[in-house]
């Protein structure tokens, strides 16, 4: 269920970015037609819009991924399973203990 929400959130973000790009393209065309922008300026503007849309999509993916990971960790803990961070802590502890053991030899 959480995975479905994650997918829907990503789809919404991607769709919103696509709509913004279409609106920006229309605006750029209108400004070129009105003589307010050159074709080159419109191309630069569209490049900026696309870059901003990609950045926005990255932030959305990162936020949703973080929330998803948090929900999964909570679920696993509630069921008594170890999480990724628990496993990482144990690996570090084992590594430290192995290093101490090596020093004693």
Image (cartoon, helix red, strand yellow):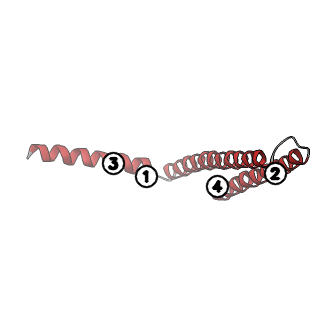
At 72% from the left and 46% from the top, the residue drawn is 44
What is the spatial separation of the Cα atoms under label 2 and label 3, in whole angstroms? Answer: 53 Å
CA neighbours of label 3 inside 10 A, class few (<14), some (14 to 19), many (20+): few
Q: In 3D space, how far apart are the residues under numbered discs 1 and 2 (Cα atoms)?
A: 49 Å
Please state the horizontal and vertical placement of residue 4, each as a whole percent of the image: 67, 59
Q: Residues within 10 Å of mark 4 (few under 14, many from 20)?
A: few
Q: Which is more N-terminal, label 4 or label 2?
A: 4
Between marks 1 and 4 in the image, the one whose residue lies nearer the viewer: 4
Upstream in the sequence, badge 3 or badge 4? 4
- Say which residue label 3 marks: 90
Name the N-terminal-most of marks 1 and 4.
Answer: 4
Residue at image x 14%, y 47%? 102
Q: Is tag 2's residue or tag 3's residue first in the polypeptide sequence?
A: 2
> Camera-side residue: 17 or 67?
17
Please give the residue where the numbered disc 1 appears in the rendered image. Answer: 82
Q: Mark 2 — residue?
A: 25
Instruction: Identify the residue at the far right of this view.
Output: 34
Numbered disc in front, either 2 or 3: 2
Q: Which residue is mark 4?
A: 2
- Evaluate if marks 2 and 3 touch, with contact meaning CB atoms under 8 Å apart: no
Answer with left or right where residue 86 lies relative to residue 37: left
**What secondary structure is marked by label 2?**
helix
Q: Secondary structure at mark 1?
A: loop
Looking at the image, tell me whether mark 1 or mark 2 is earlier in sequence order.
Answer: 2
Q: Position of residue 18 (x, y in %)?
A: 76, 54
Tags 1 and 4 touching, CB below 8 Å = no
- Residue drawn at x 33%, y 48% as measured from the top left: 90
The Cα–Cα distance between marks 1 and 3, rounded to whole angstroms, is 10 Å
- Pick the quarter of the image with the N terminus: bottom right
Whether pointer 1 and pointer 3 mark residues with C-beta atoms closer than 8 Å, the reply is yes
């Amino acid at each position: 269920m959480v995975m479905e929400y994650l997918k829907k959130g990503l789809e919404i973000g991607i769709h919103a970015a696509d709509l913004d790009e279409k609106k920006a393209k229309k605006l750029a065309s209108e400004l070129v037609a009105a003589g307010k922008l050159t074709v080159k300026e419109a191309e630069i503007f569209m490049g900026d819009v696309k870059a901003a849309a990609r950045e926005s999509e990255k932030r959305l993916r990162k936020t949703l991924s973080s929330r998803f990971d948090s929900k999964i960790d909570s679920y696993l803990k509630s069921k008594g399973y170890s999480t990724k961070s628990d496993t990482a802590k144990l690996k570090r502890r084992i590594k430290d203990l192995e290093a101490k053991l090596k020093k004693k030899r």
